[in-house]
Image (tube, rainbow, N blue to C red):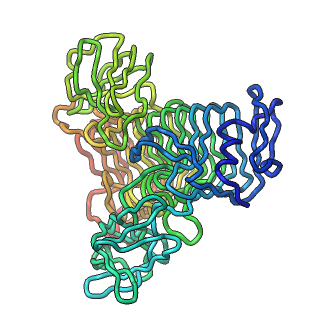
Amino acid sequence: MKIFTKVLFCLLALGFFATANADQTVSAENLGKHGVKVPRGPDGNKVLSLKKGVYHFYASNAAVKKLYVSNHDQPVSHRVQLPLTGLKNYTLDGNGSTFVFHGDSLGILLKDCDNVTLKNLTLDYARPMVSEAKVIAFKDGKTQIELDKKAFPYEVKNGRLVFIFDNCERVCSTAIAFNGKTQEIVEGTSDIVIGGAELDGNGAVWLKQDLRKNGVGVAVGDVLAMRSYDRPHPCICVYNADNVRFENVVIHTSLGMGLLAQRSKNLTFSGGGVFPREGACSSTAADATHFSNMRGLVKVENAKFVGMLDDAINVHSTCLKIVEKIDDKRLKLQYMHPQAIGFEVFGAGENLRFIKAKTLENGEKVRVRSVETLSPTQIVVTLENPVPADVVVGDAVENADYQPEVIFSGNYVAKNRARGALFTTPQKIICENNKFHNVAGSAILLAGDAAGWYESGACEDVVIRKNEFVNNLTSRFQFTNAIISIYPSVNDLDAQKQFYHRNILICDNVFKTFDVPLLFAISTDNLKFERNKIIYNTQYRAWNQEAFQLKHCGKNIKLQKLPKKKSK
């Protein structure tokens, strides 16, 4: 079955499937070529139930929306296949359908909505951002690869491998190597920088580098997940929407992250997940799920996350840099990371919290009176009370109200790069009953900074329990010093009087691991690692480092006794 963007745009974006009576279902198979206009009714439970099938959407028919999407590139506008805006009390039930998005576009936008559910859907891109190539041979310091030109259009131009998309070309910059048999990331390879390429007389593609030298060695039959550094659009964006639920929604590929939610309240992702389509090794081009400047509760449960080229979940706030103290109540603030600009960080009546840039110590909270937008990268906030005397230009500020509680439970995270789960929020975090299997970097990271990504939210209440960790940390990525890495980026630890993270309990977990650090922590207090079962193996190369590594941590640290390591 094929249905084009214009049809569902009428049905969904304009609300034509709303019914005058609550709890009535409209079936997609009963709709005419241009849709059936049903009058918008009062608030109630309105349902659009689709006949199971494959629905195709094309960027040429997509709506053009100007919006800023956190942690992505910042194009002037986004082509949006399904812009669902202003909906309240709606359910879209795909009944097992698949939506295939064609072209450079954002798949589904949920904006200014309340109480909306998407369920029983699979989302995919006809031409994903990540192109997969099989390693065929090695010769004379070069690596031969095989690409399906129909699935992943490409050319070799000016000595570089170039991937072709519907409206642009992207130079291949980096690759992740997956074992062709196990689909695990090849040990020690991390991110492989891709340089020159050439075609031989038979039209075969050769990379001008010997990938056998990477890590334990890339081998014939392995798969390279190849891409540029671009991340133009997520598959799903939730923006200024409350009480959104995803039930049994699967994302196979994306042009950036799978699900990106920002400036919203209460989101649940249950069942389904982000994992490769059949026959592939990789899924999304970046994080599977990403939550930026959220409030309320973020719950991700009983889902499967495999093969994404970044974290399964990342939760954080965004802090801005103070670039000018205009007067005693007005501050000019700067968005600092180029992939995090333009979206609202503060609103009138919300609480701003100061952060010392050098030490990452939290300061006072002050209520915001008004916000003036100067540009996508600068705003002026006016406060109800004077700026504290110790605040200086160069310090940072965050929204103290947009910091969510997190439940990450019953999930399966496996065979992905970077990290399994990344949490940076002061509200309650429960990470339990998950399986972290063969995550190439750290299984769990608690981060925070005001110097690079400007992602803030010092953790103050974390429980990591009853999880299973199996052979994680086979490669090194940013901040991945142990299976559980607590790594805030603090410029001046010696000057710090308050620890950044605190009240972290790691208990009743099972670690099945080779000789690799279990726990790394910087600037952390009240940290407990207890009642965990450690089973060592020799399946990967030993790091020969201490299992527990602490730097500038408090005295209230409790670490259990460990069994003897096994070395390889």
Residue at image point 75% right, 43% down: 48
**Relative image position of residue 361 (x, y in whole percent):** 27, 29
Out of 386 and 166, give the one closest to the viewer: 166
Out of 422 and 206, give the one closest to the viewer: 206
Which quadrant of the figure has residue 539? bottom left
- Left or right: where does residue 31 sit relative to residue 498? right
**Relative image position of residue 215 (x, y in whole percent):** 30, 72
Residue at image point 61% right, 35% down: 85
Tag count in the figure? 0
**Relative image position of residue 266 (x, y in whole percent):** 57, 33
Assign the C terminus to one quadrant of the image: bottom left
- Left or right: where does residue 51 sit relative to residue 160? right
Out of 439 and 104, give the one closest to the viewer: 104
- Looking at the image, residue 427 lies above or below residue 481: above
Query: Does residue 515 appear anywhere in the picture?
Result: no
- Looking at the image, residue 240 lies above or below residue 350: below
- Looking at the image, residue 491 lies above or below residue 321: below
Out of 418 and 162, give the one closest to the viewer: 162
- Left or right: where does residue 416 sit relative to residue 63? left
Which quadrant of the figure has residue 460? top left
**Relative image position of residue 414 (x, y in whole percent):** 49, 61
